[in-house]
């Protein structure tokens, strides 16, 4: 039997995985183990599969994903901190046939941009909102986020997030359940919480993100909102593997996965 | 021919936007300019021209809608008044850095803070000297009539897209609220998608297959590139300064003393010139129409021709006077006179100030 060479293996029929054509050649600046890269890849694959790359406009946030525009081969605008939903609204209103999505982290979407987030969802803009929640500020160096868990140590809660002092006076406040809040608004069509810590989670997440874009293509109104519970192994000060384990043990009980709302109907659990 | 109408300044601004073929207005109500969004909503421009009118949740949201919609090549505008313009400054800095064309109107009220709802010109610094972070300028147009409130919308959009810059129409509560005759232009068509793509290749319209994707951003962490980007912006501002200075001179040919005033103060100072001339004083008026770029050369030329002093007349405690002093460069006397708090100076007290502060007895 003849020897099998590398060239014999690199054949179209043997292809099981490749980088999406909508990801540029620029290497990610994200920390190894971070969920952003996986989420980027999913979005790029979905846009490619839906064939809307020539009419998609993305809005990048302030935070770790500020330079997301370098990685996607689609048109992009970089928003001020927290204003991505307002930017997405502006574009979608003047270009209703374009596919518009915003991409934000927890500090951007649920702290400084809470007002824009809520009102964009309440107006029912026909856009797709991607929300990566890792419970911490990544880019600025690991400070408390609105979604930081109670007891979680960050650069600004070095002894752990304490919502109130022992005598009851307010301190750091509580983890903000922004996604549940948005699901209550009449303007949201599809609200789901996903993750990317395992192959199964990635597959589910991709289905959800695809649906969030398909809804936008097929309809005239209703925000399609996908939260992705992710890790920040650098600022959580863990290995990537430990961070994904910690995420499942600690984040998911507070932020359980699954659809919260579909086709404007709340999902009863 | 245009159409003759009696309108408020704020309404003329709104009607002019529809007739220019603007694609969108994003705003938030604040006195004394709420008529802009009210008029637009009442006119239902979505039916007339397809123009989008959206009441945002805040001035912050509104300016960021303008930023992104402008980045996609559409003609978009917003308007506000002083405390609201403070909120817009974040977006205006991004718009300057990312070079997004747009038009916004500031119908100024008194400050600081919540201040008063009465007319003021105390937003001169805020709009001509930046306001947001970084080294940037917006072109600032100062209408002195309802007619100019309408005219400067078209001029503003033309300049905005010529230079990829934000144009501020710096009005005030008096110009915004008063009614005058105005000749409105003919209705222009909004640009089609094909026209936008052909005219503005930088605009985010979805990248064509096989071409480079476009990015509109004010961020670049590479120091050398960011320095060059700033140099590029400064070259653009120099070009604007060379080409776009606008002003009006009234009775300046033989003038020995000149009022410098814009907007509603210019209307009052014009009367002061008449009163002064009737009393035998050789006074004139320089009315800057662009506040940035400032008509500094016009002031220098007046000094060359023999003008002995200037009085900067403003509804503020003295803001534009700084630009007048810079233009005078110590060659002749220049001082400020102005009333604030919503009190509007009379032509008589303006003339009296010229006599006392500049001419001397």
Image (spheres, coloured by chain):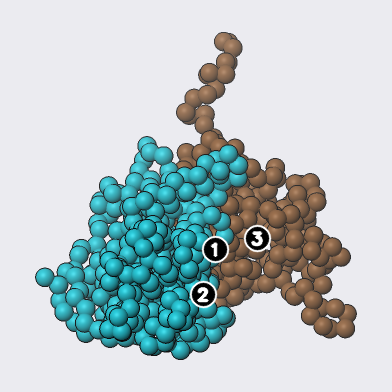
Tell me which residue sits at (65%, 50%) in the image.
Answer: A35
Label 3, secondary structure: give it: strand
Label 1 to label 3, Cα distance in Å?
Answer: 30 Å
Q: Crowding near pointer 3: few (<14 within 10 Å), some, many (20+)?
A: many
Q: Nearer the viewer, residue B63 or A157?
A: B63
Tell me which residue sits at (74%, 64%) in the image.
Answer: A144
Picture mark count: 3
Q: Residue furthest left?
A: B1
Label 2, secondary structure: give it: loop
- Whether residue A22 is visible, yes or no, is yes
- Contact between labelled residues 3 and 1, with CB atoms less than 8 Å apart: no
Q: Which mark is residue B132?
A: 1
Q: Nearer the viewer, residue A48 or B100?
A: B100
- Contact between labelled residues 2 and 3, with CB atoms less than 8 Å apart: no
- Whether residue B205 is visible, yes or no, is no
Label 1 vs label 3, nearer the camera: 1
Tell me which residue sits at (58%, 52%) in the image.
Answer: A66
Name the tint of chain B in the rendering: cyan
Residue A188: image x %, image y %?
49, 71
- Which residue is tagged 3? A133
Name the tint of chain A in the rendering: brown
Label 1, secondary structure: give it: loop
Label 3 vs label 2, nearer the camera: 2
Is A34 above or below relative to B311? above
Q: Which mark is residue B318?
A: 2
């Amino acid at each position: 039997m003849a020897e099998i060479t590398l060239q014999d293996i690199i054949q179209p029929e043997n292809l099981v995985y490749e980088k999406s054509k909508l990801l540029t050649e620029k290497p990610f600046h994200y920390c190894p183990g971070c969920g952003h890269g996986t989420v980027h890849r999913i979005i790029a694959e979905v846009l490619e599969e839906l064939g809307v790359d020539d009419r998609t406009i993305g809005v990048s946030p302030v935070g770790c994903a500020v330079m997301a525009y370098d990685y996607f081969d689609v048109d992009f605008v970089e928003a001020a901190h927290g204003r991505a939903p307002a930017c997405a609204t502006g574009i979608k209103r003047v270009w209703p046939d374009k596919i518009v999505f915003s991409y934000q982290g927890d500090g951007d979407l649920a702290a400084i941009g809470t007002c824009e987030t809520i009102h964009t969802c309440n107006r029912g803009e026909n856009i797709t909102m991607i929300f990566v929640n890792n419970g911490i500020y990544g880019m600025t160096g690991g400070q408390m986020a609105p979604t930081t868990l109670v007891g979680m140590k960050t650069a600004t809660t070095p002894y752990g997030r304490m919502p109130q002092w022992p005598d009851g006076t307010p301190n750091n406040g509580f983890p903000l359940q922004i996604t549940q809040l948005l699901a209550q608004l009449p303007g949201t069509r599809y609200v789901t919480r996903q993750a990317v810590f395992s192959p199964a989670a990635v597959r589910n997440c991709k289905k959800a993100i695809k649906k969030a874009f398909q809804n936008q293509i097929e309809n005239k109104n209703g925000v399609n909102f996908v939260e992705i519970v992710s890790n920040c192994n650098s600022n959580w000060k863990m290995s990537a593997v430990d961070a994904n384990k910690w995420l499942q043990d600690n984040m998911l009980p507070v932020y359980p996965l699954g659809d919260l709302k579909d086709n404007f109907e709340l999902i009863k659990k | 021919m245009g159409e003759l109408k009696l309108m408020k300044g704020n309404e003329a601004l709104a009607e002019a936007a529809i007739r220019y073929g603007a694609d969108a207005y994003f705003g938030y109500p604040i006195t004394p300019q709420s008529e802009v969004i009210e008029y637009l909503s009442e006119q239902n421009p979505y039916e007339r021209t397809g123009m989008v009118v959206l009441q945002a949740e805040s001035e912050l949201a509104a300016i960021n809608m303008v930023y992104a919609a402008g980045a996609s090549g559409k003609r978009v505008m917003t308007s506000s008044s002083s405390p609201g313009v403070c909120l817009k400054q974040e977006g205006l800095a991004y718009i300057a850095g990312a070079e997004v064309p747009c038009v916004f109107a500031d119908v100024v009220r008194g400050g600081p803070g919540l201040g008063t709802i009465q007319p003021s010109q105390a937003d001169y610094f805020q709009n001509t000297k930046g306001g947001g972070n970084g080294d940037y300028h917006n072109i600032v147009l100062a209408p002195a009539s309802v007619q100019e409130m309408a005219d400067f919308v078209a001029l503003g959009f033309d300049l905005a897209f010529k230079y990829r810059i934000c144009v501020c129409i710096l009005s005030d509560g008096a110009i915004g609220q008063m009614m005058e005759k105005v000749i409105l232009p003919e209705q222009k068509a909004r640009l089609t998608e094909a026209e936008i793509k052909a005219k503005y290749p930088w605009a985010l319209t979805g990248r064509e297959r096989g071409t480079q994707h476009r990015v509109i951003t004010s961020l670049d962490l590479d120091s050398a590139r960011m320095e060059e980007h700033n140099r590029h912006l400064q070259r653009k501002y120099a070009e604007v300064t060379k080409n776009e200075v606008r002003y009006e001179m009234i009775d300046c040919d033989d003038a020995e003393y000149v009022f410098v005033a814009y907007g509603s103060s210019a209307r009052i100072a014009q009367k002061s010139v008449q009163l002064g001339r009737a009393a035998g004083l050789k006074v004139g008026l320089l009315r800057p129409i662009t506040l940035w770029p400032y008509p500094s050369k016009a002031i220098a030329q007046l000094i060359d021709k023999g003008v002995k002093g200037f009085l900067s007349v403003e509804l503020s405690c003295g803001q534009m006077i700084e630009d007048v002093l810079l233009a005078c460069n110590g060659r002749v006397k220049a001082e400020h006179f102005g009333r604030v708090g919503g009190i509007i100076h009379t032509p008589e007290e303006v003339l009296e100030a010229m006599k006392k502060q500049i001419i001397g007895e």
